[in-house]
Image (cartoon, coloured by chain):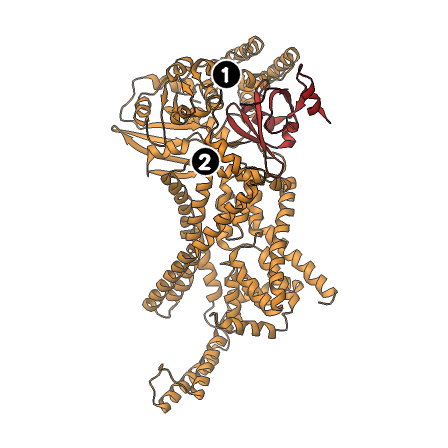
Amino acid sequence: MTGKHNAATCKTPPAPATLDRMEPGSMCRVIRVGLKGPLRRRLMDMGIVNGAPVEIVRVAPLGDPMELKIKGYLLSVRKEDAKHITVEIHEDQPG
Amino acid sequence: MKTNQADNAAKSLPRDRNRPLTMAIAGNPNAGKTTLFNTLSGARQHVGNWPGVTVEKKEGSFDYHGRTIHIVDLPGTYSLTAYSMEEVIARDYILTETPDVVVNIVDASNLERNLYLTVQLLELGAPVIIALNMVDVAEGRGIRIDHNQLGTLLGVPVIPMVARTGKGRDELMRAVLDPPPPAQLRVNYGRDLENAIQKLCGTMDASPGTPPPAGGARHAAVKLLENDSVYEKKLRDSFGPDIVDRKNRLAARIEQTLADDTETLLVDRRYGYISGLIREVVSRPAMDKRTMTDNIDAVLTHRALGLPFFIFAMWATFQATFTLGAKPMEWLDMFFGWLGGVFAALLGDTLIGSMVVDGVIGGVGGVLSFLPNILILFFAIAMLEDTGYMARAAFIMDKVMHKLHLHGKSFIPLLVGFGCTVPAIMATRTLENRKDRIVTILVAPLMSCGARLPVYVLLAGAFFSPAAAGNVIFSIYLIGILFAIFLARIFRTKLLKGDTTPFVMELPPYRMPTLKSVLLHMWERAWMYIKKAGTTLLSIALLMWALITFPLTFPGQDAMERELSRRAAAVEQRASELGAAPGADIKDARYNELVEAVEEQEREISSAQLRHSLAGRVGRFIEPVLHPIGFDWKTGIALISGFAAKEVIVSTMGIIYSVGSSAEASSELTGALRADPIFTPLTAYVLMLFTLLTIPCMATVAVIHRETGSWKWTAFSLGYHTVLAWVVCFVVYQGGRLIGL
């Protein structure tokens, strides 16, 4: 999959992707939270709701989980869970 | 049943000024709940568990301007769903205990997410006061919050404060003394959802005999549409199954129209409402300033530096606990030794004397001597938690722990287990998910603790070459780790399946911990340990003492004691022949021989006594079970005594093999073991394995019961350790024999 590279070349509309594929330092916006049950609700309660902007801060030293900045605080999510979160990529880099 | 409304109505009547006032503290984890609780209640606090569960419940009381205020610290939660025990506890407490006031502590530097809980508390109809905490941190970041406007929009008092320094404390307390009426917030969930809420409320109102549910009909309707299992059951019980069917039909229609399920829509709208609030009351700089936390994290969770720093932090914790703790531990041992001496002199060589000295002081003292380690470890853990590093440690280790089907936070208790299993099990308190906690508690004893090392050293030293001994001991540690990994997987996927911990964890901002809170944290946990030592452990210690002491007489005792007196007389006679006072330092070969003969006879007697004691009988009784794994009754007694503390296995073997239990005796014991035909390198190795895998010591068992809060899990732990130890030892022993070892 080279969705990331494609997204960099076409400006509009932003390409949908899943959160786990986002590079550290990039910004995106939540489109859909897949999953079911408590995990899904927990993610939503923590602010991963439709339209929420998310900054990917870093990935843990061993490659998983990832650290996100959302609604002004830091949240860590496993990649296997982030896979179910559909996002659209923001071209503008965080300040 | 008394309803919430009725209660609230009663509360709006003129109040009795002398009645104690109940105040609950609610808020997100890391919002400063504990700090506020400690600032208000001071030293008068009580830590226990919520009924039926092992979620910690903190209560305290204090007087403010002549009024007694009782504070209850609710579990820290992000939401009020039915998915987590903590959230259910918090909302049940508010609905059924109806505290006079709920102080919702909110982190001003993280307002948006914190308000998500606030909105739910307000929807619950609780009498809420918002304590807007850490306004200093927010201001430092250029975030300005119009707290008056926030209060007006939400319809509740908002008090800005800094809980750490106590700023705003008096303003908060003034508001608490004059509690607000129940909140009446109605979030507008949009036409379709509001329609459904109205219809469900109508159904509830239309059954006249049934009072509306606690928290009001609207709140119950919202919870139904969130598919809250607790509310579904509650409402089905009081209003019949029709209400749930109706909800399902309404929800299905909304899902068709809006292409999303009602739970998602409700959460979305709630956050949408909060975004609106934030726009009205918060002004912040266009560009977020890089925070201190960002800078620290850039190093501590750095791709390359993160792991080495983590290893260093763990090493430092471990070292501090067991190296720094070694000296005070020695002092405590010396103190209990001295105390034992005092009582021995006082009570003499009587049964009572033996019970007090060997049973009570020996048993409880042995357990309490771990106290320095426990204090230091909990100081270190409190530091790791209060600074915010604990969450980073979990973040870094999660990938490894996840492979074991555990949470990143399980790493620390397991590491501590190499020092001592007791604090390791207590350290599982940092795990939020009960199933993760139980699995971690179950496998923690497989991390070979420090007390088991003397057993390995003795056996490896006696039966393996010095070059091989190190590898032999290392292999035992490794086997423990491998079993822990293997069993954690099995337990988590088979026994405690489902409800896997979502690793959706906040990485809280780094903060300078206050000494007061760290010390309080440490003390709370240490005190629980001391209490345990004084109750359960005391009785087990006495039982162990009785097992090896009774019966007092044994066949052939008279003859053996006559022989002892004869030999003692010979010593005295020789001394007088030499013209020296008894006990003086006599350098005479014949004399020394006679003294040794006395000591040998003493050892024979204690060995015979032990053989005929209850423990000895138990050892003989279980011998048929021990035989297939290569042990005899003597090993059986040693293993039984190991229940008191693992290092006791060595001293018990000293007594059994009549070499005494002093340090000088260890080389003699090595010789005695080698001379015993039952012992081969294979049996020695199997005995090491058994020591590793079998039931942990009594202090650990007591703590397992304390921390799981369940006899069932304690029994399971005992059972699985016994079975595991036996099966593994059977396979190794019989396998070893087959290949001719």
Q: Which mark is residue B450?
A: none
Measuring from the top left, give residue B88's x and y in whole percent. Answer: 50, 28
Q: Which-is-in-front pick, marks 2 and 1?
A: 1
Q: Left or right of A56: which side holds B3? A: left
Q: Colour of chain B?
A: orange
Count neighbours of disc 1 (C-alpha within 10 A) and say few if under 14, some if 14 to 19, many if 20 or more: some
Secondary structure of residue under mark 1: helix
Q: Quadrant of residue B24?
A: top left
Three-letter residue code for mark 2: Trp
The outermost residue toward the left is B66
Residues B606 and B303: in front is B303
The outermost residue toward the bottom is B577
Q: Quadrant of residue B13?
A: top left
Residue positioned 60% across, 73% down in the render: B674
The residue that label 2 is drawn on is B50
Please say whether residue B631 is visible from this viewpoint: no
Measuring from the top left, give residue B65's x and y in whole percent. Answer: 25, 28
Q: Chain of mark 2?
A: B
Count neighbours of disc 2 (C-alpha within 10 A) and say few if under 14, some if 14 to 19, many if 20 or more: some
